[in-house]
Amino acid sequence: MDNDYEVKDISLAKQGHLNIEFAEMHMAIMQKIRKRFEKEKPFEGLTIALALHVTKETAVLVKTLIAGGAKVALASCNPLSTQDDVAAALAEQGVHVYAYKGENKEDYYKYIEKVISHNPDITIDDGCDLVTAIHTKHQHMIPKIIGGCEETTTGIIRLKAMERDNVLKCPMIAVNDNKTKHLLDNYYGTGQSSIDGLLRASNILIAGKIFVVCGYGDCGKGVAMRASGMGANVIVTEVDAFRAMKAVLDGYRVMPMAEAVKIGEIFLTVTGDKHVIRLEHMKAMKNGTILANSGHFDNEIDVAGLENAAKKRKIRPFLDEYEIDGKKIFVAAEGRLVNLGAAEGHPSEVMATSFAGQAFACEYLVKHKGKLGSKVITLPEEIDNHIAELQLEVMGVKKDELTEEQKKYLGSWEEGT
């Protein structure tokens, strides 16, 4: 099993090693964690199964877990997000990696099964497909599993539904809910990388365009900020009253999708929900409208419905044209997450804090084995704060500390006006 892997082309490994090396330069926090893991070996004798985007940043996480003593098996969590050179580099180093860019549905789920075949003690998920497969098809393995980690809003939605339905059988840490993950990954990361993917797919001018952001959670806020900064006229669609109000106060127009489709020129979905843009919406759009998605799954835009109703042409590597009712609508990256389908995902600096959360979550599971219960949990605030402290340290930033008087004041109630 030591040479067990499936990648597109092992000869791409040289470039993959270079890209991983470049990522490591910008992920100094992970280097610090790796050095401690090398000494303490928190995962000695354990197998960690991962379903993540196979990128240069993920490779840094994999190397960190291995340094901690883990055996690692890795599959992609999205058919379009694998960086083939990175997959080859990991395979060359003996990692059980199963992934290639452009996987068909059969291979995607076959690779999930291959990862499961390594009999994991801990799982790391991006979207919950790995955990779902274990809970539905491999329940006999669950007693061995210490727990798992989930990194996406979409995955947390699924896990909480499993918990609510009493089918979740092991503890799952919602790494997505770390403050450090929300701020850097969802807000700054998704904002920059989604625009990057959109531009690589289409090379259009953002300035002056009516840019519709569907969803105003942390990811939507980041996308709206970046699009506005590039000169777009931003419209937000939302179903949550507070988020809609926040968008208005942030200076954006808010309106129902049925109105936005009549004037929007670029649409980008970041909701974590299904069929946010439906066929009736697309039929009402302007000629030349571009659609993209940065949610984890490819069902935010009803591409299947569009496929059945329109004539399709591939215009560019990651841009498809659909002719419907005499108009042309363009879809980037097949409606899959555009930041990884058409680009390289979040910058390394962003993923450093997210993957620090993953590494610490795995360690937390081991330290609290058998004590956490079968539920979705959040890492303690002190761990989240420790990630921020480490990141500030590698950035060379110093902050103030509370005096003893201030600590006492903040912890008391007697002193007033």
Image (spheres, rainbow, N blue to C red):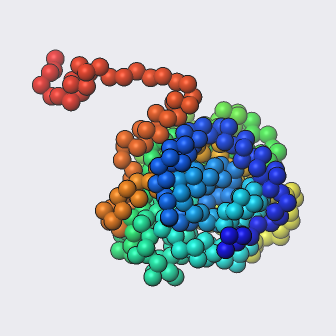
Task: Please identify the quarter of the rendering in which residue 377 is found.
Answer: bottom left
Q: Is residue 325 left or right of residue 67?
A: right
Q: For the point 39% across and 50% down, which residue is it?
A: 379
Indicate the position of residue 413 as horizontal and vertical percent values.
15, 28
Task: Please identify the quarter of the rendering in which residue 301 is found.
Answer: bottom right
Task: Please identify the quarter of the rendering in which residue 285 is found.
Answer: bottom right
Indicate the position of residue 265 as horizontal and vertical percent values.
73, 48
Query: Does residue 311 sit above or below 215 in this rendering?
Result: below
Q: For the point 83% across and 68% down, which residue is it?
A: 312
Indicate the position of residue 49 as horizontal and vertical percent values.
56, 66
Instruction: Answer yes or no: is residue 239 visible.
Output: no
Q: For the point 85% across and 60% down, which residue is it?
A: 11
Query: Does residue 132 sit above or below 337 in this rendering?
Result: below
Q: Is residue 322 left or right of residue 213?
A: right
Q: Residue furthest left?
A: 414
Q: Residue furthest front?
A: 39
Quarter that holds the C terminus: top left
307 or 352: nearer the viewer: 352
Query: Does residue 300 sit above or below 67 in this rendering?
Result: below
287 or 361: nearer the viewer: 361
Q: For the point 53% across and 66% down, which residue is it?
A: 47
Instruction: Answer yes or no: is residue 135 visible.
Output: yes
Indicate the position of residue 130 as horizontal and vertical percent values.
55, 70
